[in-house]
Amino acid sequence: MRTNKRLTAIVVALILVLSGSLFAEDRTYVGGRSASDDGVPPFSGAVMVGDTLYISGNLGLVDGKVPEDPADEARAVMDAIKSTLAAADMTMDDIVSVQIFCSDVAHYGAFNSVYRTYFTKEFPARAFIGSGALLFDARFEVMATAVKR
């Protein structure tokens, strides 16, 4: 009886170890940075795990500055997201979830008028969050998750 329990425990342990190895997915980085990179912000632009791309928050800066017009800023941030997706061989229509952080929800309409032009299929799930102040006095910061269709 004791031998059966030990054998069962060994088999279960082996299955767990092997399944972790077999199902572990490789990661690839878009705009990858590491702890050894000095003088850069401590995050990567995006991380691909399997068919899923996790895109870091992006700001809509133009030449390092926030555009005067909220629509221009929205366009710049959406172009940044689109560029990250293209680097991973994906499109805007691969996005499944978006979070928009906004310093003033009064810009909701301006953002939406630009945002809707970036998709040709169903819109992704989304949150538009009134956040208060953002870095560099930006109005919008956008992060997204995409899954290859």
Image (cartoon, rainbow, N blue to C red):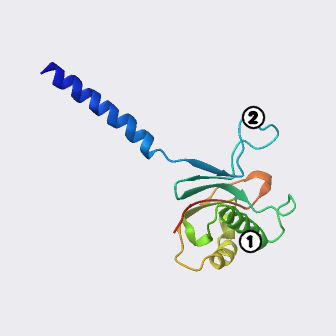
Against 59, residue 82 (above or below) is below
Amino acid at dot 1: Arg
| Secondary structure of the residue carrying numbered label 2 | loop
Density class for disc 2 (Cα within 10 Å; few <14, some 14-19, many ≥20) is: few
Residue 70 coordinates in the image, percent (x, y): 76, 70
Q: Nearer the viewer, residue 46 or 59?
A: 46
**For residue 69, which quarter of the picture?**
bottom right
Q: Position of residue 18 (x, y in %)?
A: 39, 38
Spot the residue most to the top.
2
Name the quadrant containing residue 138: bottom right
- For the residue pair 45 and 88, the one nearer the viewer reads as 88
Residue at which label 1 appears:
75
Amino acid at circle 2: Ser
Q: Residue at x 82, y 62 (%)?
A: 66
Per the model, the C-alpha gap separating discs 2 and 1 is 33 Å
Q: Quadrant of residue 103?
A: bottom right
Side of 126 relative to 32 (left or right): left
In the image, which disc is placed on residue 119?
A: none
Quadrant in the picture for the N terminus: top left
Which residue is found at the position 76% from the left and 51% from the top? 135
